[in-house]
Image: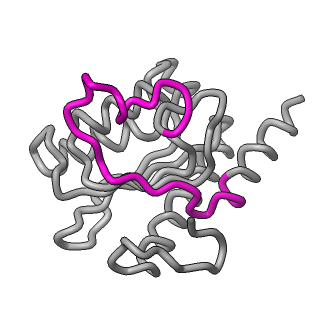
Amino acid sequence: MLDGDETNCDSCDMDHEIVDYMEMALSTAEIAAHRGEVPVGAVIVDTASGRIIANSGNQMVGRSDPTAHAEMLALRAAGNMIGSQRLVDCDMYVTLEPCPMCAAAISLARIRRLYFGAYDPKGGGVEYGARIFNQASCHHRPEVYGGIHESESAALLKNFFETRR
């Protein structure tokens, strides 16, 4: 797990890039919070070039769309950007463990690696809940790395919900 200034990830190629991409996802989540959306941000990176090809924050309220999760919007944008529904050479960075819907979409898109910040015991679909990638019906299982900037991701969510109570 990476958190804050730690940059130890034995199976990751360039630790500083992982932290940078997660910080971009956190910035995107903060923008979503300013719009009144649950602060979740997602970034998709083309691993061949290292270029960010999509980033999005939650837009469920703004779009009146229960499927407008950050991950879903980023997957759609990345697919449009590269002209394919298969994102085999892409990694996703998201501030919160994806829900079952998003985890299934990540599998269908063939994302290479999934990096996420905060774990979600209540609504997660990767390490908690449905554990989509562990199901026999799952066609593709990305490499998964959780807990990257976990405390910052969790604090952003906690602060958002505290201000609404």
The verdict on residue 136 being magenta is yes
Quadrant containing the C terminus is top right
How many numbered callouts?
0
Please indicate whether residue 88 sits to the left or right of residue 99 in the image. left
Please indicate whether residue 116 sits to the left or right of residue 108 in the image. right
Residue at image location 64% in from the left, 80% down from the top? 5
Looking at the picture, how far across and down is residue 66, in whole percent?
Answer: 49, 19
Looking at the picture, how far across and down is residue 97, in whole percent?
Answer: 53, 42
Quadrant containing the N terminus is bottom right
**Span colored in magenta:** 127-153
* The one of 43 and 113 positioned closer to us in this rendering: 113
Please indicate whether residue 2 sits to the left or right of residue 144 in the image. right
**Main SS class of the magenta portion in the image:** loop
Asked if residue 131 is positioned above or below residue 89 in the image, the reply reads: above
Residue at image location 18% in from the left, 42% down from the top? 80
Quadrant of residue 152 in the image?
bottom right
Residue at image location 35% in from the left, 44% down from the top? 74
The colouring scheme, among rainbow, by chain, secondary structure or one colour, is one colour
Asked if residue 123 is positioned above or below residue 52 in the image, the reply reads: above
Farthest residue to the right: give it: 165
Asked if residue 118 is positioned above or below residue 52 in the image, the reply reads: above
* The one of 32 and 88 positioned closer to us in this rendering: 88
Farthest residue to the left: give it: 83
Asked if residue 5 is positioned above or below residue 74 in the image, the reply reads: below
Residue at image location 19% in from the left, 43% down from the top? 79
Looking at the picture, how far across and down is residue 11, in whole percent?
Answer: 37, 71
Looking at the picture, how far across and down is residue 101, in whole percent?
Answer: 41, 25
The verdict on residue 116 being magenta is no
